[in-house]
Image (cartoon, helix red, strand yellow):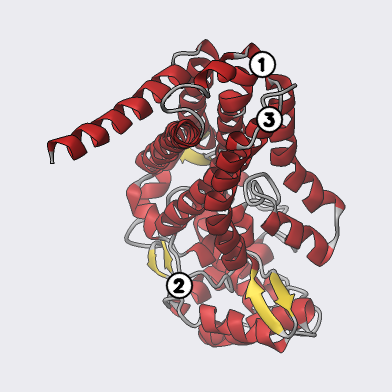
Amino acid sequence: MAVSTGKRGGKMRFLFLEMKRILRTRITWILLGTAFVLTAVMAYIPVTFEGVIVEEQGEEKELAGLEAIRYYRQYNDTIYGEVTTEKIREAIEKRQKLYQEYDSEYGENIPARVYYEELALSEAYVHGVKEAFADLDNGRAPQVSEINPEEVDGFYDRLTGRLSSIMQMEQKDYPSAETAAQEKFGKVKRPYLYYYGASSNSMDYQILLIYIITVLCVVIAAPVFSAEYQTGADDILRCTRHGRMRLAVVKILSALLITGMAFALCGVLYILITNSLFGWEGTKTSMQIIYSVTCFPAYNIGQLQWANLAGSFLILLAAVSFTLFLSARMKNNVSALAAGLLFVILPVIADAALPGQTGIWLGCVLPAGGVGLSNCLLYSMIDYHFLHIGQASFWNVDLLLFIRAIEVPVFAALAVYTYCRRDLRR
C-alpha cells in the first residue's frame, strides 16, 4: 500500500514539476496576465454602451453606463416578468399611437426622450411580434402600423408555423431537419421571460474574449515539445527513467491543466462581473427575447452564458490537444507556433470564404472551429444550420461538440505517439 502511494505521489510530483516549468517562463506569465486583465476590461465595456435620455427639472439629461442600468432596472413591476400577450399588445398599441402622434412611419420623428421613456423598454416585445408575424412565404417582417393588436393574442401559437417557414426556406430538401428543430423548440418554456440585464453586446464580448484566450492558450501550448527539440534538451530527457511515454503524458496533462484552468477562471470571472454589473435578475430572460423568438435551445440568458462557456471549453481542449500534436511534430518553436495559430484562424477564414455546407462542415471538423467571430458556438446555437448525412439531419452544434469530444483524446494520443516515435537521428 505504501509503495502504491509512493508511486502515485511520484507521478503527481512529476506533473507538478512540469507545470512549474511551463509557468516559470516569462511569456506564460505575460499571456496569463493579459488574459485576466482583458477579462475584467471586456466585461465592463458593454456597460459603456448603455444610455438613456431623461427629463429632470424641465431639462433633458443623458444617463450613461451604470446610471443608465440603474434607471432601466427600476421598472421591474411594469415591463418585466412573463411576456404575456397583454404586455405585447400594450407595447404595439402604444407604439402605433406615438407613431401617429409624431407622423412617423419608422419612429424617426419621435424625440429621443419620448422614445426612451415610452418605447425603449418594450423594444424586445415589438421585435418579437414582427418576427412572429413575418410572411410565411418570403420571411418579410411587417411594419408596426401593419400589425393588428387584436391578433397579438395568437403570438405564441404562431411560433411553430414561423419556425416551420424558416426551416422550409433553409432546409427544404431535408424534412428530418425540420422535425429535429421542432422537437427541440417544443422543449422551450413559454411564456417567455424578460428582465433587464446583460445584453447581446455582453454576449458578443464573451465571444471575443473566448477567442482571444484560446489564441493565448495555443501560444502557451505550442512550445511544450518543440522548445526542447530546439535546445537539444529532449535528447537527454528521453534517456531518463521517465522519458518517452510518461514524459509525453505529463507534458500534455500539464499543458491541458494550465490552459484549461486559465480559460475556466477567465470565463467564470467574465460571467460574474457581467451579471454583477447588469443585475442577476436579467439572467432569467429567455434567450428567444434577446435573439430570435424561434431559437430552439431551451435556455435563458444565464444558462446560455454557461452553455457557451462549457462548449467553448471543450473546443479549447481540442485546439490545445491539436497544438500539442503539432508541437510534437515540429522541430522548432516558430514552426509549432505558426502552425498552431494557423489552425485557430483557419475556421474563421473558412466560414467567410466557403459557402453553405462546406464551410459549416469544415468548422465542425477543425479543432478550433466554434471559437471565433461569425463562426462561434453562440451564433451556431441561435442559428438553424443542420448538416446532413444521407437523409439524416444533425444540428451542427450537436455534431460540433460530439466531434470535439472525440478530438481531445485522439489528438492527445497522437501527440504521445508522435513524441515516442520521434527519430533522434537528424
Mark 1 and mark 3 lie on one chain; the one further toward the N terminus is 1
Q: Which percent across, then down, holds residue 341?
A: 70, 33
Q: Which percent across, then down, holds residue 328?
A: 63, 32
Q: CA distance from mark 1 to mark 3?
A: 14 Å
Query: In the figure, is residue 254 to the left or right of 351?
Result: left
Q: Is residue 288 above or below residue 379?
A: below
Query: In the figure, is residue 328 to the left or right of 413?
Result: right
Residue type highlighted by circle 3: Asp
Is residue 116 shown to the viewer in this render? no
Mark 1 and mark 2 lie on one chain; the one further toward the N terminus is 2
* SS category of the residue bearing label 2: helix
Which of pointers 2 and 3 indicates the residue nearer the eye? 3
Q: Which residue is mark 3?
A: 423
Q: Which residue is mark 2?
A: 87
Q: Residue at x 57, y 20 (%)?
A: 234
* SS category of the residue bearing label 3: loop
Categorize mark 2 by other alpha carbons within 10 Å: few (<14), some (14-19), many (20+).
some
Number of marks present in the image shown: 3
Query: In the figure, is residue 19 to the left or right of 31?
Result: left
Q: Which residue is mark 1?
A: 230
The quadrant holding residue 260 is top left
Is residue 14 shown to the viewer in this render? yes
Q: Which percent across, then down, holds residue 306?
A: 43, 52
Q: Which percent across, then down, holds residue 136?
A: 74, 84
Q: Nearer the viewer, residue 103 or 295?
A: 295
